[in-house]
Image (spheres, rainbow, N blue to C red):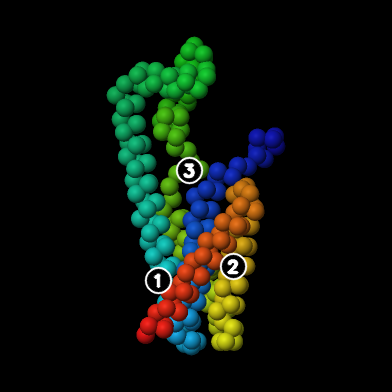
Amino acid sequence: MGLMGRERHYGGRIGWLRAAVLGANDGIVSTASLLVGVAAAEPGRAPMLLAGVAGLVAGAMSMAAGEYVSVSSQADTEAADLERERGELAADGTAETTELAGIYEKRGLAPPLARQVAEQLMEHDALGAHLRDELGLSEIHRARPLQAAFASAATFSVGAGLPVFVAWITPLPVVIPWVAGSSLVFLGILGVLAARVGGASVLRGTVRVVFWGAFAMALTALVGRLVGVAV
């Protein structure tokens, strides 16, 4: 097998990686913040765990529904573009060949070569050539609603389950620092894994998720404490 057969690109992971990272990050941050906020307002394991489990279930369903609706809208737009392009090809293939050749000329090919490339690609796969080079659509970037919904719901549940488990096993007097601290560790691990899989900077990805997670938990704890005092 040649080098081209072994080559792998990070772009093929964009769809599921985005949904997975978003789900896990949101699960950890939102649930840990909820637990810390409830613990700050009303110290007690039962209300804290009830809020955490309810947040896990509601959040997972919300993530799945939101991702499915959002990505389905993208898929509908892609399908509309596909049908429109198919109609234009059927109506005037010569004009579409000229349009494709013009795209290649703008990318640096000489006019005769651009025309030759366009004609050969039109003969091989006219619709695929226009979707890829005119509209920027490719197989690895196609919208997949069910994949995105499942990845978001599953990773949200895993992420949310971590701080809930910590809150369940930790002694009540130290539950807030333990939930907050362990959640920051989980976020750091998530940042490292996401950066590794996506080929991004490990340090930048880790600092980003840890900082915003800490900010969210601190703000929620403050609100919980204020509400608890007021009540």
Q: CA distance from mark 3 to mark 1?
A: 29 Å
Mark 3 and 2 residues: CB-CB less than 8 Å, in contact? no
Quadrant of the rendered structure where residue 189 is?
A: bottom right
Tell me the residue that label 1 is attached to: 58
Mark 2 and 1 residues: CB-CB less than 8 Å, in contact? no
31 relative to 144, above or below = below
Foreground of the two, 118 or 158: 158
Q: CA distance from mark 3 to mark 2?
A: 31 Å
Q: CA distance from mark 2 to mark 1?
A: 22 Å
Q: Hey, which residue is sitting farthest top in the picture?
A: 112
Q: Secondary structure at mark 1?
A: helix
Q: Residues within 10 Å of mark 3 (few under 14, many from 20)?
A: few
Say which amino acid is labelled 1.
Ala
Q: Residues within 10 Å of mark 2 (few under 14, many from 20)?
A: many
Tell me the residue that label 3 is attached to: 141
Q: Earlier in the sequence, mark 3 or mark 2?
A: 3
